[in-house]
Amino acid sequence: MSTVVTTVEEFEAKITSGKYLVDFYATWCGPCQMLLPVLEEVTPTLEQSTVEILKVNVDELPQLAQKFGVMSVPTLFVIEDGAIKNSEAGFKPADALVDWVTTSLA
């Protein structure tokens, strides 16, 4: 299950410990909408690896997008215990997304 982050404080408190796939998105973004069912599809696989999905709306939390240098959406980050392990912009199919997250955390 993914969690929609609503405040900067909530986001910063969450990422301090644990493994996360963070999706910076916008509701008006076509590729972001294409990514929604992919994230739902990979959630059970990622949960087995204790990876939680966080979603950040760049229009509602622009300061967070700016802090992370998000220039386009969707932009995905893999974060472990507060440290950015990897980031990439654009759509990814399910298999490629799982492989990317798993490799980033290896």
Image (cartoon, rainbow, N blue to C red):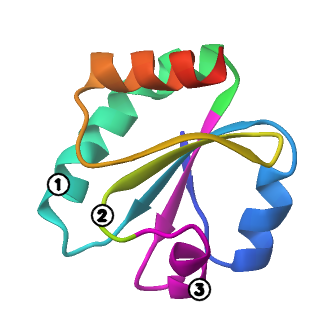
Q: Which residue is mark 1?
A: 31
What mark, if any, has residue 63 been given in the picture? Answer: 3
Residue 56 magenta-drawn?
Answer: yes
The quadrant of the image that shows the N terminus is top right
Where residue 105 sits in the image (x, y, percent)? 64, 22
Outermost residue, left side: 30
Judge from the rendering whether residue 36 lies leftward or rightward of residue 62; answer left or right: left
Where residue 47 sits in the image (x, y, percent)? 61, 23
| Alpha carbons under labels 3 and 2: distance apart | 15 Å
Q: Residues in magenta?
A: 52-70
Q: Residue at x 30, y 63 (%)?
A: 73
Front residue of 36 and 71: 71
**Residue 105 versus residue 81 in the image, above or below:** above
Q: Which element is circle 2 on?
A: loop
Where residue 27 sits in the image (x, y, percent)? 27, 72
Q: Residues within 10 Å of mark 1 (few under 14, many from 20)?
A: some
Q: Residue at x 51, y 26 (%)?
A: 101
Judge from the rendering whether residue 49 lies leftward or rightward of residue 77; answer left or right: right
| Alpha carbons under labels 1 and 3: distance apart | 22 Å
The reply to whether discs 1 and 2 touch (Cβ–Cβ < 8 Å) is yes
